[in-house]
Amino acid sequence: MADKKKDGLSRKSFLRKMGAASAAMAGVPFLAGSTRKHQEYVGLKDFSGSFSANDKINIALVGAGDMGQGNLATALEHSGTKVVAACDLYESRLTRCKENWGDDIFTTNDYREILERDDVDAIINATADHWHKDITIDALNKNIPVYLEKPMVQRVEEGKAVIEAEKNSDAPLIVGSQRTSHILYEKAGELIKDGEIGELNFVEGYWDRFSAIGAWQYSIPPNADESNVDWQTFRKDLPDMAFDPKHFFRWRNYNEYGTGVAGDLFVHLFSGLHMMIDSKGPDSIMATGGLRHWHDGRNAEDVMLGLFNYPETETHPNFSLSLRVNFADGSGGGSLIRLVGNEGEIEIGWNSITLRKSSLSEEPGMTIRDFSDGTQEEYQKYYEEKYPEQRARVIEPNEFVYRSPDGYNDRYDHFGYFFESIRDGKDVLQDGTFGLRASAPALLTNVAHRENRIVHWDPENMEIK
């Protein structure tokens, strides 16, 4: 959580606290499969409400690519929101924003013009990773709330500057890794805290893909050139380079702008895990991987595996984590996270949780075949006395499936918490500190692999040891 309580912003009337109106949890059952003694629910947060014109949150989009426009569309599903401006370095995307949201929105290729506008109450920062830090800090310095796409920063050492800007600002920052707002992850966290799988000892997760688009081969417009792409701004402070549309439209493929498969996808798994078990992160990181299939000019790996050790804390025991991304997964791809304890496991998929309960038999069994006949007979008698036969027991259900409702969108909930923070001054879970603790181990996976070493990380102080 943030170190300080934000009492809300004072720039505009909509930032005043709105009184006692607080959304309640709507108890809607989504339990399937075996039932227990009591019905269980996955709760939905109600973000609906009516807001006056003065309470409307005017949003500006900075980075109007596919993810940015998708984020904006989701944000505008909330009542009391409006888009007033958009910024991008490709002219056609700004045209598309006007087609989607009206000719009256202001468009520019200079984000600083967005931050100078009096009608901008919050921004969505969905730029390439190498621009995350600067734009976010500039917005926070002007007390403009920021919804920042994950990972929070491109390099670990940039993180504390963002946290410092957040600390000195009256505006909230939320990092856009939406699994921390997912009702299924909240439910999984409850099950773990309730001891349903016993003591956690191992977690594994993967996010595999089997398509060109999934492997970041995004469409490149045939007419793209420096007349409609602001190439020099995109390159930021990198050395001069001739315009290359692959670098601009497929920037995730290049380490100059992106953070690899770990920064793109591991960070979601870290965010969800840290929320579920209230963890600050691992203390050691190992990795292996490489470029196995997508030899299209990229320098980012398409396969990455990471191993992470989580030390014992007040909130969880010592356990091991294994993560994987494979962009050439011939089995078809998919995503899963599995948490294993000494009494069961929880599997989290796209729209369901499966809880499987297990218990060790009280009888250990016998390994006596290598003993002599006399010793076997003696041990058999000893065993039967120590573990006498008991009456048969009813077999209770050991598998429970929880589902999210059709059409559920965790990104919608994530924006809901962001807007609550703007209006009511509520803390957000995924603030800068949480965001760095989730981003850092993902980014350090790249370091561990590329430098062929174990990286030791201090999750409390957020420093490389």
Image (cartoon, rainbow, N blue to C red):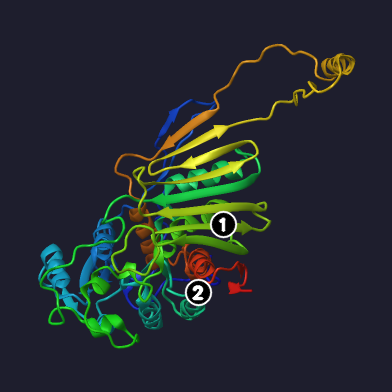
Relative image position of residue 119 (x, y in whole percent) = 24, 77
Answer few, some or many: residues within 10 Å of disc 1's Cα (few below 14, many 20 plus, some between 14 and 19): some
Identify which amino acid the numbered label 1 is placed on: Leu
Going by the image, does 408 lie left or right of 288?
left
Using the image as rendered, state which of residue 310 and residue 102 is in the foreground.
310
Q: Amino acid at mark 2?
A: Val
* Label 1: element kind: strand
Where residue 307 is drawn, which disc sits there? 1
Badge 2: few (under 14), some or many (20 or more) residues near its Cα, within 10 Å?
A: some
Q: Which mark is residue 330?
A: none
Question: Residue 8's image quarter?
Answer: bottom left
Query: Which residue is labeled 2 in the image?
Result: 156
Q: Are marks 1 and 2 in contact (CB under 8 Å)?
A: no
Q: Is residue 23 above or below residue 169?
A: above
The residue positioned 80% from the left and 19% from the top of the image is 387
From where the camera sits, is residue 343 visible?
yes
